[in-house]
Image (cartoon, rainbow, N blue to C red):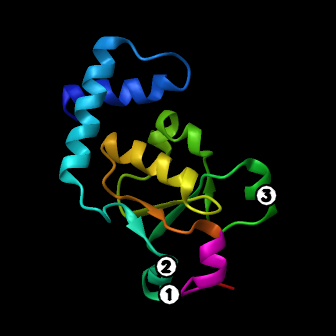
Amino acid sequence: MHSSLKAAACAVGLAAVAPIAPALAGELEDEINGYMDFATETAGIILPQQLTREIWEGIHFIDTRSLADFEAGTIPGARHIEWREVPGRLDEIPEEGMVILFCNTGVRSSQATFAARVMGRENVLVMQSGYEGWLRDGAYHPE
């Protein structure tokens, strides 16, 4: 990981608990701008309709909703990491294979996915339309 990316990762992780120091804020801004300049409009996004049986077994699902939502029902095999905790728990997210973050609609998980991708996790995707979209439109629902 580049030193500026490490500084950005630290800044993102610390942002939840303390204001970002001006020096780190500049590095973080540079990293975010660099990512956004390079990323395509659909980078980091997957649709429930794309989650077919053929690829299902190779996916790591991360439910970024509240613990109460997770316990009420989730995608089979999903792990729970609340969206705000993703930067601080990045080491719990697999570095290999497809990792899909989701919340109810895709709003909170998109923020968590953005943070993870800026912190260097290119294998992390957000499920657009979230858990509700998967329930309604998912191509595959394991029994």
Q: Quadrant of the N terminus?
A: top left
Residue shown at the point (32%, 65%) measured from the top left: 42
Q: Quadrant of residue 75?
A: bottom right
Q: CA distance from mark 3 to mark 2?
A: 21 Å
**Category of crowding for the residue at label 3, using alpha-carbon neighbours closer than 10 angstroms: few (below 14), some (14–19), many (at least 20):** few
Residue shown at the point (20%, 41%) measured from the top left: 34
**Category of crowding for the residue at label 1, using alpha-carbon neighbours closer than 10 angstroms: few (below 14), some (14–19), many (at least 20):** few
Q: Which residues are magenta?
A: 132-140
Q: Position of residue 19 (x, y in %)?
A: 48, 16
Mark 1 and mark 2 in contact (Cβ < 8 Å)? yes
Magenta-span inclusion, residue 56: no
Residue 92's disc is: none
Query: Considering only order in the chain, which callout, 1 or 3, is on the residue closer to the N terminus?
Result: 1
Magenta-span inclusion, residue 139: yes
Q: Amino acid at mark 3?
A: Glu
Q: Is residue 66 shown to the viewer in this render?
A: yes
**Category of crowding for the residue at label 2, using alpha-carbon neighbours closer than 10 angstroms: few (below 14), some (14–19), many (at least 20):** some
- Look at the magenta stretch and give its main secondary structure: helix
Secondary structure under badge 2? helix
Q: Quadrant of residue 26?
A: top left
Answer with left or right where residue 115 lies relative to residue 4: right
Say which residue label 3 marks. 71
Q: Position of residue 94 (x, y in %)?
A: 43, 53
Q: Nearest the camera: 88 or 19?
A: 19
Q: Please determine whether, in this image, residue 138 is positioned above or below residue 84.
A: below
Q: Quadrant of the C terminus?
A: bottom right
Say which residue label 2 marks. 56
Residue shown at the point (56%, 86%) measured from the top left: 140
Say which residue label 1 marks. 53
Q: Please determine whether, in this image, residue 82 is positioned above or below residue 27.
A: below
Residue shown at the point (58%, 45%) measured from the top left: 83
Q: Amino acid at mark 1?
A: Arg
